[in-house]
Amino acid sequence: MATIYRKTDKGQAEIATRVHHLAPRLRSGLIMVDGKRTDEELRKMILPPADETLQALIKDGFIEAIAVTADRPSPRATPAAGDPQPAAAPAQSAPTAPVLAALTADEVRKRAVRWINDKLGPVGEGLSIRLEKAKSREDLRTALASAENVVRDQLGAGRLAEFQRDVVSLLPPA
């Protein structure tokens, strides 16, 4: 069984204000918690000892469990001899990328922080903090330009193009 955690109000306040002065290891772990990742996924992203980090965040009220998921059955690669063949799924057209309208600067900032946290993990913590602090559109544009450089350096041109498409292009013009 896997558990999904989310930040509590206290955890969200810590991200926004650093009022509780969490140790860097705990803050990095807190940043990774998004209400979607399971504890198994978080253990892969949080610096060791990940279990101790998660337990400390729970104990201190920064995160809480919101769901426990059942283990997923592993699909068989090929049916065994004599197994009935599954009915063919109806043909579907290839999925198309959703068309996103320009978002508010605040929505783009949140999207950028999530993208950086998802793709860079603890390496992107400083960049995430800089993005979080960007309150004006100009500050956000500057922080996004820095983010583009870091993404290019750390993840390559392909991921940079993805970041530009999924985040930067959504910032409305001034």
Image: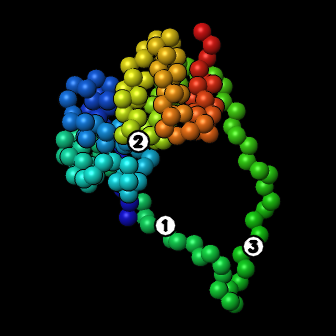
Single out the mark in the foreground, 1 or 2: 2
Single out the mark in the foreground, 3 or 1: 1
Tell me how far mark 1 sits from mark 2, CA to CA: 25 Å
Q: Amino acid at mark 3?
A: Ala
Q: Secondary structure at mark 3?
A: loop
Left or right: 93 in relation to 136: right
Q: Which mark is residue 87?
A: 3
Residue beneath the point at 80% across and 51% down: 93
Residue 103 in the image: state x and y as whole percent. Answer: 59, 23
Q: Amino acid at mark 1?
A: Arg
- Counting residues from the start of the chain, the first of labels 3 and 1 encountered is 1
> Residue beneath label 2, please?
121
Tell me how far mark 3 sits from mark 1, CA to CA: 22 Å
Left or right: 54 in relation to 96: left
Classed neighbour count for the residue bearing mark 1: other residues with Cα under 10 Å, few (<14), some (14–19), many (≥20): few
Residue beneath the point at 32% across and 29% down: 15
Q: Secondary structure at mark 2?
A: helix
Is 84 rendered above or below residue 98?
below
> Residue beneath label 1, please?
72
Residue beneath the point at 48% across and 31% down: 150
Classed neighbour count for the residue bearing mark 3: other residues with Cα under 10 Å, few (<14), some (14–19), many (≥20): few
Residue beneath the point at 57% across and 29% down: 167
Q: Are marks 1 and 2 in contact (CB under 8 Å)?
A: no
- Counting residues from the start of the chain, the first of labels 2 and 3 encountered is 3
Single out the mark in the foreground, 2 or 3: 2
